[in-house]
Amino acid sequence: MTEVIYFDIDGTLRDEKQGLPDSVCRAITKCREKGILIVICTGRNEESIQEDVKALNADGVISGDGCGVRWKQKVLKHIAFSIEIVQEILEEVKGSGSGASFESDNSIYMNAEAALFYKEDFEKKICGDQGAEKRKEENRIFYENNISQLWKEIGKVHKVCLIGDGPFIEAIKNKFNGVVEISQIREWNHRMYLEMLPPGSGKGRAVKFLNEYLNIRKENSMSFGDGENDVGMLLESGIGIAVKGCSEKLLRYADSVCGSPAEDGIYRELIQRKIIDEDIERTVKKSEKEKRYGNGKTLVAKRGDLSDLSEKLL
């Protein structure tokens, strides 16, 4: 019996072009009617969570890739880097020409290279969207060179992201290996991307921690994600669902793959698994949706058997 569901945000709950689909709101309402708890589990800090997601009034929030855990209004966990580690990373970045961002609970501090990289990436995602300006406002992340203000919260940084060439990223990874948690390392827009967290963090640890706090057995929890940083979350859930278009690595750990936000993937998956019942109104409109996106059937396999589906789904 599912007692709690963990949801990543970007690429899972919502689409950057279309925002939060109405089907997600209906699905969460139906989950609540069955007494299922809802937890947001995101890499974003709480300040940058979009307003439409905040309006869902989740029971709990795991933020900063597991560095922060809040249940209702109570903060249960908060982890940050030491000032010395942040200063060391800053010294390594200085003069390298690499992008760097430092995230605290309230802000994201970027140098010029990171601000340009993230801005160009986001604008590419929303290119051609008539509501592009609205999407920028909803995103709640401002891509600006504000690293000179980092001193205000240097002791509260819980995530560091670096963008650079392969040798630089590899050198940083090797230098700080064992001192930090490597959350992600991958190619992104022809650059190498490295994401580092304080020891003891990560979405998986946070999910395990909150399940234990709520006295919920692992097998009675469920999660939805699309990124490489969601691997731990899926592994610590009884049922782990990858979203279409997800990281290829995540496929190896998923129990099934659901449709994208635009395809009402979460809603359909929960119906498929008989966790919620389909709306009568939804049934009437279903055929019209299928003409646009296909029948939205869920591909189900045992965890670890999905990698051969990657070409079909990604």
Image (spheres, rainbow, N blue to C red):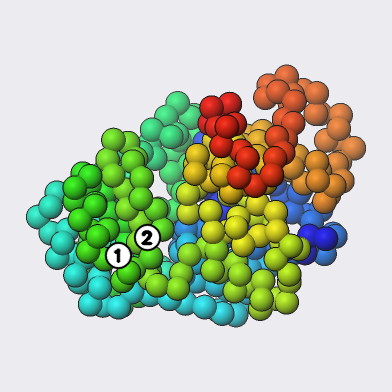
Residue shown at the point (74%, 31%) measured from the top left = 297
Q: Position of residue 114 (x, y in %)?
A: 26, 49
Q: Position of residue 14 (x, y in %)?
A: 58, 45
Q: Which residue is the site of mark 1?
A: 177
178 vs 195: above or below? below
SS state under label 2: strand
Q: Position of residue 277 (x, y in %)?
A: 87, 46
Residues 253 and 136: in front is 253
224 vs 87: above or below? above
**Which quadrant of the rendered structure holds the N terminus?**
bottom right
Q: Which residue is the site of mark 2?
A: 182
- Say whether disc 1 or disc 2 marks the residue closer to the N-terminus: 1
Left or right: residue 68 versus residue 154 is right
**Residue 189 visible to an observer of this rendering:** yes
The amino acid type, in three-letter code, at marker 1 is Asn
The amino acid type, in three-letter code, at marker 2 is Ile
Quadrant housing residue 117: top left
